[in-house]
Amino acid sequence: MSYYLGIDTSNYTTSVCLFDSESGKVISGRKLLPVKDGELGLRQSDAVFHHVQQLPLMFQEAFDGFTDQIKAIGVSYAPRTVEGSYMPCFTVGTAVADILSSVLKVPVYRFSHQQGHIAAALYSIERLDLLSKKHIAFHVSGGTTEALLVNGDDGFVTTRVVAHTLDLNAGQLIDRVGVMLGLHFPCGKELEKLALQCSDKIKARATLKGADCCLSGGQNIAEKFLKEGKSPAYIARFTMEFVTAAISGMSDRIRETYGDLPFVYAGGVMSDSIIREKLTAHHDCVFALPEFSSDNAAGTAVLSFIKDQD
């Protein structure tokens, strides 16, 4: 068998993955970085420290009983493929990848965290063919809220941003409201459970400027609702509806400009069942499977295999 190793040390999760090029299956391990209650994320120095502590454990999990040859390594080197995109936490993954490359005598291929998200999404729905076709890929998370035109010309997710948030990222809004309600960061899963307890019909309208969105107003409204005594479930539901309205509105305006291209939604926020259900009802689109929506190394592993075929 030929295996390809993926490594991703993002601002929230330590993850490694082995992609079996013969079966098309993956073996992965991941662990969230610890965040103290009431806090909204980590300093980069703390993120680097936790990755150094956690990465060996992730390798132990993924490599348990593993004896086959690794052909190449894929690693996330930066958040996005734009000039100046940088976070210290990714240096942990690239350092480990370079060490393993020297020991194993195999190549290292570097991809952005965002490229990994897109590839993981397409892998999960068995649509890797879209890597070589033009499509729209949404990456919606705590660190990014963007819609990308993937040109498909070189098969390696060359992209151009066609819409983005003008203030908060969707995941930031969800986490800020969640912490306000006493939930543990990152708050997506807990806020979703809370929102599903609300049966009220809530209409939320997001502010759009062209195809770009503004999400900070959602936080202001949520704070207003809390002062007015609205239930936590109501506030949680409103937040999810607000994010849905923003992504849906962006999708409509992008389709007006770029026509009937395939739409793919990836990133941790897009694993939320409320958002997925609403968008699916109104748009022709596909989503990453939930386990491949949040930060993971599957995309870098798969991309390393594809790159190694050149």
Image (cartoon, rainbow, N blue to C red):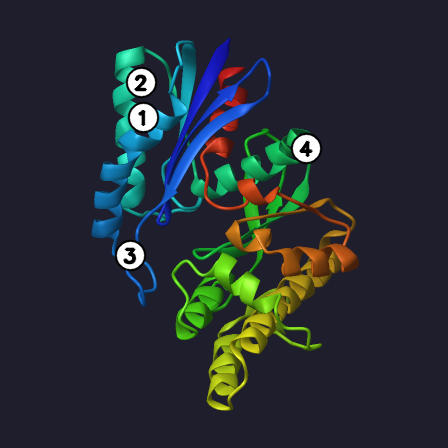
Look at label 3 and name its amino acid: Leu
Q: Is mark 1 in CB contact (under 8 Å) with mark 2?
A: yes
Identify residue for label 3. 42
Identify residue for label 4. 127
The residue carrying pointer 3 sits among few (fewer than 14), some (14 to 19) or many (20 or more) residues within 10 Å by Cα, namely some
Look at label 4 and name its amino acid: Arg
Q: Is mark 4 in CB contact (under 8 Å) with mark 3?
A: no
Quadrant in the rendering for residue 59? top left
**What secondary structure is marked by label 2?**
helix
Q: Nearer the viewer, mark 3 or mark 1?
A: 3
Which label number is shown at residue 101?
2
Q: Earlier in the sequence, mark 1 or mark 4?
A: 1
Residue 11 position in % (x across, y down): 35, 49
Identify residue for label 1. 97
**What secondary structure is marked by label 1?**
helix
The residue under the point 51% across, 79% down is 222
**What secondary structure is marked by label 3?**
loop
Residue 156 position in % (x across, y down): 55, 31
CA–CA distance between discs 1 and 2?
6 Å
